[in-house]
Image (cartoon, grey):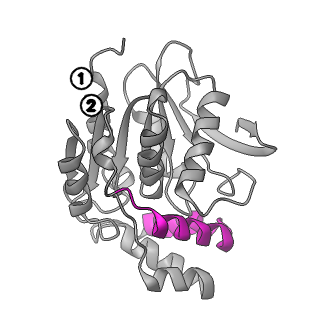
C-alpha cells in the first residue's frame, strides 16, 4: 500500500488497479468516522470511466499513523496536504458521513482544488447520539456493534455487519472519540449556501444515522446540486447498493462540462 509522508505522519492511500495517471480526472474518497479505505473498495474496483480513483486513510485510521483530529476543519487541512502531495491539480472529493463533513468544510475553504464534490450519507450538522458517544468512551466494543447495527438497512446480510464491526474495531478508541467530537462540533448550516462547486448528494432511503432529510436540506441549499436517494439502502449505501451508487457517480461526472 503506498503512502505519503505529511508533517512526519504516514498517510496511506489506495488506488484503482490502474494507479494514478496525469491528465485524468481524479476521484478522492474520504471515509467516515472510525473507518478506513475499505468502505470504498467496490467503488475503487468497479467505477467506470477514465478517472484516477484514490481512497485515503485519515491520520490514526487504517494503516495511517498519527493520532487523528477532533475538528473537521483540521481534517480538511490534511486533505489539502494529500491533494498537493499527490500532485493533483484538482479533483472530485467524495466523502461519506464524517468524510462528507470534511468535504463540505474543504469546499468552503479550498474550492480552487475542486472539480466537484459528492456528499454521501452526511449533513450540514452531524450531532452524534449520546449513547454512541458515551459508549465509545465506556464500552467500545458494544458501541461499535450498535453503530454497525444502525449503519445498514434491515435487508442486509449479517456478513456485512460483522465485517463492518471488524474494521471499525481496528480504530483506537481515542481516535474514534476524536471523530465523534469533531462531528458533534460540526455546523455549516449558515454557510452551505456559499458552496458553488458542482455537487452530487447521495443518501440511502433507510439511513438511520444521517436520515434522508439531511440530504434534502443540503440539496435545497446548495445551488444547482443533484440529489439521489437510493432505495432499500442504509447509511453504508456504497456497500449495500454499489451498482446504483457507482452509476450515480458516473452519470454525475460524465454530464459535467469540461473545466476551463
Q: Is residue 239 left or right of residue 68?
A: left
Boundaries of the magenta span: 159-188
Q: Is residue 243 visible?
A: no
Q: Position of residue 203 (x, y in %)?
A: 27, 54
Task: Say which of 116 and 112 sits in front.
Answer: 112
Q: Position of residue 21 (x, y in %)?
A: 56, 17
Q: Secondary structure at mark 1?
A: loop
Residue holding disc 1: 255
Quarter placement of the N terminus? top right
Marks 1 and 2, how far apart in space?
6 Å
Q: Is residue 175 left or right of residue 199?
A: right
Q: Residue at x 49, y 57 (%)?
A: 32
Do residues under tags 1 and 2 come within 8 Å of each other at their CB atoms? Answer: yes
Q: Position of residue 196 (x, y in %)?
A: 31, 34
Q: Is residue 188 visible?
A: yes
Q: Say which quarter of the image contains residue 154.
A: bottom left
**Mark 2 packing: few (<14 Cα in 10 Å), some, or many (20+)?**
some
Magenta segment main secondary structure: helix
Task: Say which of 16 and 89 sits in front.
Answer: 89
Q: Residue at x 27, y 17 (%)?
A: 257
The numbered dot on residue 252 is: 2
Amino acid at each position: 500500500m503506498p503512502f505519503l509522508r505529511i508533517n512526519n505522519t504516514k498517510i496511506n492511500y489506495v488506488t484503482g488497479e490502474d494507479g494514478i495517471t496525469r491528465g485524468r480526472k481524479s476521484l478522492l474518497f474520504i471515509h467516515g468516522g472510525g473507518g478506513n479505505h475499505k468502505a470504498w473498495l467496490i467503488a475503487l474496483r468497479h467505477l467506470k470511466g477514465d478517472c484516477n480513483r484514490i481512497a485515503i486513510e485519515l491520520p490514526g485510521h487504517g494503516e495511517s499513523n498519527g493520532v487523528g483530529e477532533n475538528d473537521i476543519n483540521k481534517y480538511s487541512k490534511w486533505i489539502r496536504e494529500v491533494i498537493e502531495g499527490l500532485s493533483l491539480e484538482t479533483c472530485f472529493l467524495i466523502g461519506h458521513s464524517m468524510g462528507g463533513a470534511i468535504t463540505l468544510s474543504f469546499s468552503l475553504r479550498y474550492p480552487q482544488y475542486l472539480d466537484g464534490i459528492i456528499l454521501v450519507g452526511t449533513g450540514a450538522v452531524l450531532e452524534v447520539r449520546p449513547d454512541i458517544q458515551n459508549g465509545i468512551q465506556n464500552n467500545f466494543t458494544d458501541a461499535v456493534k450498535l453503530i454497525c447495527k444502525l449503519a445498514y438497512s434491515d435487508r442486509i446480510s449479517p456478513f456485512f455487519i460483522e465485517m463492518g464491526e471488524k474494521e471499525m474495531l481496528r480504530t483506537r478508541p481515542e481516535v474514534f472519540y476524536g471523530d465523534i467530537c469533531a462531528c458533534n462540533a460540526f455546523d455549516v448550516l449558515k454557510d452551505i449556501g456559499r458552496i458553488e462547486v458542482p455537487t452530487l448528494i447521495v443518501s440511502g432511503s433507510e439511513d438511520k444515522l444521517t436520515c434522508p432529510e439531511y440530504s434534502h436540506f443540503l440539496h435545497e441549499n446548495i445551488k444547482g446540486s443533484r440529489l439521489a436517494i437510493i432505495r432499500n439502502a442504509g447509511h453504508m449505501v456504497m456497500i449495500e447498493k454499489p451498482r446504483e451508487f457507482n452509476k450515480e457517480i458516473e452519470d454525475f461526472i460524465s454530464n459535467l462540462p469540461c473545466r476551463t
